[in-house]
Amino acid sequence: MNTTTKTILALFTLTACGGGGESSGDAAGLSGSIKIDGSSTVYPVTEAAAEEFSAKERDVRITIGVSGTGGGFKKFCAGEIDITGASRYIKDSEKELCKSGGIEFIELPVAYDGISVVVHPSNDFVDSLTVEELNTIWGPAGEGKVTKWSDVRPSFPSTDLALFGPGPDSGTFDYFTKVINGESQASRGDYTASEDDNTLVHGVSSNEGGLGYFGFAYYAENQSKLRAVPVKNGESEPVGPSIESIADGSYAPLSRPIFVYVRKDVADRPDVKAFVEFYLGEGLGLAQEVGYISLPEAEASSARTRFANKTTGTAKE
């Protein structure tokens, strides 16, 4: 499976006139270059924050790469980037990688997401799927065997099942496989994989037998091309992904927090400090605008305190 990596310039070489445009507080006159990479799920929030920040601080250049949560941590722990986005908590192996690279990290939640299971809009036979059926579809045992919709549920037609999902460098892949298949990275391999969620959107929306999963923001942006499938978890009624169901936790087990990780050694650099403070302030309000769920104020305040105190490590420790 190939990892798709793209680099987006969040700032398009804007040159300030008369002192860099409007700035606030100690951010006046900032310049620098901030390198960000990681999760495609976190990307829309980071992009929105970068665009808003860049309108204020025109001499700070922000580049954002999308190589998946795992790919981002590899670069982050090697000291190649300043900030990485992650759609899951950092793994023990990645903590060791950062330790060996001399990188201490500050973990900051930025929003809540619900991994959306989607089908082609013409699909009128799937009213919901159980967690067990999702396991039947995506578990390793399904490879080469569960190839038609009728293999999932006998009442479904014998339409070919075309699967689209994140690749192994994706935090969404890690999270989904853990809660659906019982083990992170445990998945069938015979599906179209990409760390670029727009590729997955195109795949499902172009195939009448298509089924895929990715972050809620990408479903919200493409509702005319996709239909979200409610998920039945245990004895509860099926629940579809929405701002309300993700916020109240009823969209289970596919709701989760998403994060950015900041290198401690660059956290006091003026451009990085100003950007992260902006991200954790005005920037957090942009999460809902791009299709995610904003952090409750208590959690947002805790994240700001965590950054101000340069508290390292992960909440999962």
Image (cartoon, rainbow, N blue to C red):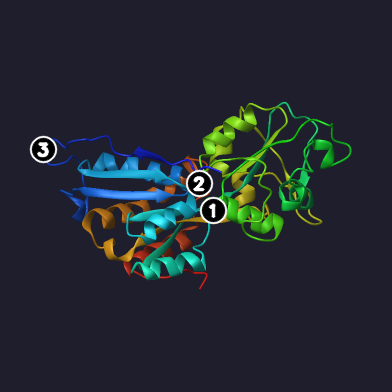
Camera-side residue of 67 and 32: 67
Camera-side residue of 162 and 211: 162
First-in-chain label (3 vs 1): 3
Q: Are marks 3 and 1 in contact (CB under 8 Å)?
A: no
In this rendering, does residue 235 appear at all?
yes
| Label 3: which secondary element | loop
Location of mark 3 (residue): 18
| Label 2: which secondary element | loop
Q: Is residue 265 left or right of residue 251?
A: left
User: Where residue 76 appears, x then y in whole percent?
Assistant: 38, 58
Marks 3, 2: nearer the viewer: 2
Marks 1, 2: nearer the viewer: 1
- The local crowd at label 1, few if under 14, some if 14 to 19, many if 20 or more residues have their Cα within 10 Å, is many
Marks 3, 1: nearer the viewer: 1
**Residue 171: mark:** 1
User: Where residue 160 appears, x then y in whole percent?
Assistant: 77, 32
Residue appearing at x 45%, y 42% in the figure: 44
Residue appearing at x 57%, y 43% in the figure: 216
Location of mark 2 (residue): 41
In this rendering, does residue 280 appear at all?
no
Residue appearing at x 43%, y 53% in the figure: 72
Q: Amino acid at mark 1?
A: Gly
